[in-house]
Image (spheres, rainbow, N blue to C red):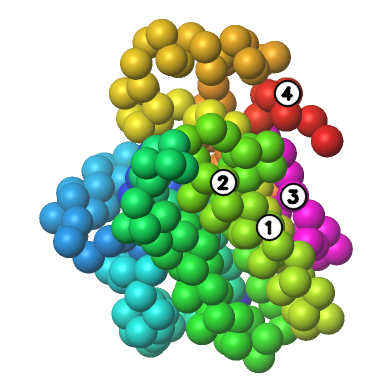
Amino acid sequence: MSQKVALVTGGNGGLGTAICKALVDQGRKVVAGYYPPEKETAEAWQKQMAEEGYEVEIAGGDVSDYEDTVRMVKEITENVGPIAILVNNAGITRDKMLKRMTPEMWNAVIDTNLNSVFNVTQPVVEGMLEAGFGRIVNISSVNGQKGQMGQANYSAAKAGMHGFTKAVAQETIWKGITVNTISPGYVETEMTLAIAPEIMEAIIKQIPAGRMAQPEEIAMAVAYLTDDANSYMTGANLPVNGGMYMI
């Protein structure tokens, strides 16, 4: 039996790297999506992954652009194989209090964090429906559940991801496709480690676990949702936040 192909958008980031490794360990043929202007960085990342024993394909595509995303999906399907597993992980932040947030900051986050989920999933799901199998995991955020000052754009986008999850889950489960969301809390990556120490201390005080998550802890949840045997859980949201927000 051939390996199932998994696409991870934003695959060469801190969290994306851990997800790619977890899916390789699960026996998948993994493709990491990257933003086209970052091709050299993605190629260097791919080389480093290979040195660590993880063979991962890379594919450039602007997930905020529907036509470019369709092109990327088509190329992956032709060159690697039909996509059976999709992890919508690409995301950015443009934080600012609402009264100072510009339309450009709002649109950039909505396009990259929310519209991208439609842009990637819509062309991928057709092949999943034909195959009668699919696993879709959307990486949201604790701030999509509880909101966060200075992140009206990010919180709105991440909340919208789960609404998308619940709708598409109902449309596709009858064909063996599950669609779920993971809402991580703060994860220890290069981005969060760059936060000012006093701000980070205040954040950690809000987390009962007393620390940020490791990327591998989020990747473990992704692997659980993408497992072939996990065929009955759909439309769900897994909160992986160290107890920071419970509902």
Q: Nearer the viewer, residue 86 or 141?
A: 141
x then y, percent, for residue 126: 60, 87
Picture quadrant of residue 100: top left
Q: Which residue is mark 2?
A: 155
Q: Is residue 101 visible?
A: yes
x then y, percent, for residue 211: 56, 15
CA gap between label 3 and label 2 equals 15 Å
Q: Which residue is mark 1?
A: 162
Label whose residue precedes the other's in the sequence (4 or 1): 1
Q: Residues within 10 Å of mark 4 (few under 14, many from 20)?
A: few
x then y, percent, for residue 95: 40, 39
Label whose residue precedes the other's in the sequence (4 or 2): 2
Pointer 3 with pointer 1, Cβ within 8 A = yes
Span of residues in magenta = 225-240
At a point 36% along the width and 84% down the height, the residue shown is 67
Considering the numbered disc 4 on the image, is that residue within a helix, a strand or a loop? loop
Considering the numbered disc 1 on the image, is that residue within a helix, a strand or a loop? helix
CA gap between label 3 and label 1 equals 7 Å
Q: Nearer the viewer, residue 160 or 58?
A: 160
